[in-house]
Image (spheres, rainbow, N blue to C red):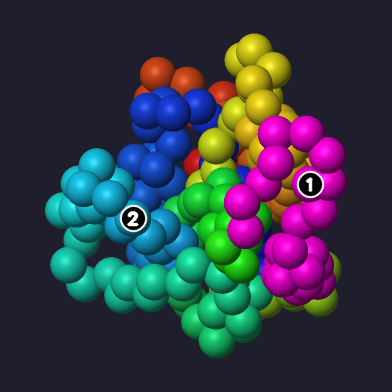
Amino acid sequence: MSCTLVFGGARSGKSAFAERLAQDSGKEVVYVATSRAGDGEMASRIAHHRERRPAHWQTVEEELALAKTLREHCAPQRLVLVDCLTLWLSNLMFCDGREYPEVGDLALPERFHEERAALLDALDTGLAGEVVFVSNEVGMGIVPWGAISRSFADEAGRLNQAVAARAERAVFVAAGLPLWLKGPAC
């Protein structure tokens, strides 16, 4: 298995860069979309991403069971592109419909912990083929206001660190330009 983490800020060009990696690989591509269209603005973002992707790529929509989806779709001579880990993380944080208080107990749903552990286990035990993860870097700005926002930033940072530690390559994208942090540049 080969694993690459592509991360950057909002509108940094990280998804377009990851899509170029997938296109240039020459492999069959399965695009795993983790987002859900909860409102019109998000639906518009999803449509923009769909329009940019080649029509021959297979798209799989999965909001929660990412490890299971990777085990089903990873294969030799295939590249699985996951866009994006931070949307997946957000889906897990709110998967049981709970309202988080601004202070007090911020215990995350049990499914959050189970799915995160399953993803890291899948990376540890190996997947066939190649995986490219897209993720947001949310820790370079001000500390978020509100307990749940801070918890999200903390969990996103922890997840990015865990995936980067397991990945052969990690690339930070800013202004559409890649900065290779780990492994050989493509």
Residue at image position (61%, 51%) is: 99
* Position in image of residue 109 (x %, y %): 73, 64
Q: Amino acid at mark 1?
A: Leu
Q: Is residue 174 magenta?
A: no
Residue sitting nearer the eye, 111 or 156 = 111
Residue at image position (61%, 15%) is: 141
Residue sitting nearer the eye, 40 or 6 = 40
Task: Give the residue pinned by disc 2.
Answer: 38
Segment tinted magenta in the rendering: 98-121
What kind of element bears circle 1? loop
Q: Is residue 103 magenta?
A: yes
Height in image: 122 above or below 53? below
Height in image: 104 above or below 36? above
Quarter of the image holding residue 175?
top left
Q: Which label sits in the foreground, 2 or 1? A: 1
Residue sitting nearer the eye, 182 or 123 = 123
* Position in image of residue 169 (x %, y %): 66, 45
Count of numbered badges drawn on the protein = 2
Q: Amino acid at mark 2?
A: Gly
The furthest residue to the top: 142
Residue at image position (48%, 77%) is: 77
User: Can residue 18 be seen in the rendering of this structure?
Assistant: yes
Q: Residues within 10 Å of mark 1 (few under 14, many from 20)?
A: few
Height in image: 69 above or below 34? below
- Image quadrant where one finds the N terminus: bottom right
User: Can residue 133 be seen in the rendering of this structure?
Assistant: no
Numbered circle sitting on residue 106: 1
- Looking at the image, residue 80 sits to the left or right of residue 163; the answer is left
* Position in image of residue 24 (x %, y %): 36, 53
Instruction: Quote the CA–CA distance across marks 2 and 1.
Output: 23 Å
